[in-house]
């Protein structure tokens, strides 16, 4: 993204930022939080460019034409810095050296004579030493620097860091707004609503999902899964075929299918489903399944997803055992 584009659901936090700016109450550090896919990074870029622009319009939007806007847009403005975990780092942590480098840049005067913006993302990936080092910087602010700490897990940050930041949460938009935004960007006839629900309501995550090959196969995968519950199909062969895809995503989907079946089996009239476009087939299968068995299976799926992240267990074996247990579950 090189141009300035404020997403429709960013307007609330944007107004708070502009209000603070025009009132001379800009905070030294902001904690920009929100689910993955709400556009935290894009929002931080908007703030950064707005702070650099020489001729913002009446609403505080950058002009896109001045020298600073130009440097920013080509990713070459010295007063806008982004710190992310080292790509080579196995742990994916942000280390103390990187924070020290940032603080050194902070202590220099800005190149353009205005604000300097320092983005740290994801801020929850700072290790303890790095976090403590940042804390020192935040305690002795240089007047022209603004730190933007981006995170989907604000509770994972040190409380002392959180308390030094102004909270700027970005909420997921109302579903109708998110759907409109998504429909204008995704292929017509695509499963916008389902992608949105599967992405927890975060529009950018939903858009990324719609662009994935797996999304087009979701119906077929679900069909195989439901047939298996009736004892049709070979779980081991299915596991072998599915292992070629993105397993964490698949585990998430299996969880969403089973959770939807539980919701449909509860007897509520119109439960909110993660797979609203597959409600009919899910309901048909749910009617054939024992609720207690289904619930126990759902808990196993939750556990398996955790194991997939934390153990070195062969993912295919994990999937095999889950599918074997699922096979014929509706005939028991
Ligand atoms: Zn400008």
Image (spheres, rainbow, N blue to C red):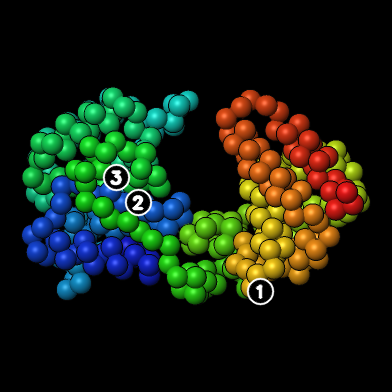
Q: Position of residue 314 (x, y in %)?
A: 71, 28
Which callout, 2 or 3, points to the residue nearer the camera? 2
Q: Position of residue 245 (x, y in %)?
A: 71, 44
Q: Position of residue 117 (x, y in %)?
A: 21, 47
Examine the rendering and report whether any part of residue 207 can be seen: no
- Residue 199: quadrant of the picture: bottom right
Q: Residues within 10 Å of mark 3 (few under 14, many from 20)?
A: many
Q: Nearer the viewer, residue 14 or 170?
A: 170
Q: Residue at x 19, y 64 (%)?
A: 18
Q: Earlier in the sequence, mark 2 or mark 3?
A: 2
Q: Are marks 2 and 3 in contact (CB under 8 Å)?
A: no
Q: Nearer the viewer, residue 51 or 309?
A: 309
| Up-down relation of residue 52 to residue 324 (above or below) | below
Q: Which residue is mark 3?
A: 149
Q: Residue at x 58, y 34 (%)?
A: 309
Q: Residue at x 65, y 70 (%)?
A: 268
Q: Which residue is mark 1?
A: 269
Tell me the CA gap for discs 2 and 3.
8 Å
Which callout, 2 or 1, points to the residue nearer the camera? 1
Q: Earlier in the sequence, mark 1 or mark 3?
A: 3
Which element carries disc 3, helix, strand or loop?
Answer: strand
Tell me the CA gap for discs 2 and 1.
34 Å
Q: Which residue is mark 2?
A: 33
Q: Nearer the viewer, residue 178 or 61?
A: 178
Which element carries disc 2, helix, strand or loop?
Answer: strand
Q: Nearer the viewer, residue 19 or 231?
A: 231
| Up-down relation of residue 136 to residue 32 (above or below) | above
- Residue 107: quadrant of the picture: top left
- Residue 91: quadrant of the picture: top left
């Amino acid at each position: 993204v090189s141009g300035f584009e404020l997403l429709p659901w960013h307007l609330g936090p944007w107004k708070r930022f502009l209000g603070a700016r025009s009132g001379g109450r800009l905070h030294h550090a902001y904690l920009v939080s929100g689910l993955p896919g709400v556009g935290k990074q894009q929002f931080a870029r908007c703030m950064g460019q707005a702070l650099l622009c020489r001729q913002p319009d009446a609403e505080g939007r950058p002009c896109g034409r001045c020298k600073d806007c130009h440097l920013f847009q080509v990713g070459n403005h010295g007063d806008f810095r982004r710190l992310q975990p080292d790509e080579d780092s196995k742990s994916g942590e942000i280390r103390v050296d990187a924070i020290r480098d940032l603080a050194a840049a902070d202590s220099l005067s800005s190149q353009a004579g205005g604000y300097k913006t320092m983005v740290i993302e994801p801020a929850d990936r700072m290790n303890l030493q790095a976090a403590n080092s940042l804390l020192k910087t935040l305690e002795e602010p240089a007047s022209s620097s603004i730190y933007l700490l981006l995170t989907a897990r604000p509770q994972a940050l040190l409380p002392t860091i959180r308390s030094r930041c102004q909270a700027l949460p970005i909420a997921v938009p109302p579903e109708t707004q998110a759907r409109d935004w998504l429909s204008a960007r995704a292929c017509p006839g695509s499963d916008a609503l389902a992608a949105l629900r599967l992405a927890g309501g975060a529009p950018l995550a939903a858009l990324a999902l719609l662009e994935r090959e797996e999304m087009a196969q979701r119906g077929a995968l679900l069909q195989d899964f439901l047939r298996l519950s009736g004892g049709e199909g070979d779980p081991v062969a299915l596991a072998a075929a599915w292992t070629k895809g993105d397993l964490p995503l698949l585990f998430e989907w299996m969880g969403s299918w089973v959770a939807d079946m539980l919701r449909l089996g509860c007897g509520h009239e119109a439960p909110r489903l993660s797979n609203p476009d597959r409600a009919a087939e899910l309901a048909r299968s749910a009617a054939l399944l024992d609720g207690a068995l289904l619930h126990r299976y759902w808990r196993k799926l939750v556990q398996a997803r955790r194991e997939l992240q934390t153990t070195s267990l062969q993912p295919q074996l994990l999937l095999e055992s889950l599918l074997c247990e699922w096979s014929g579950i509706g005939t028991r």
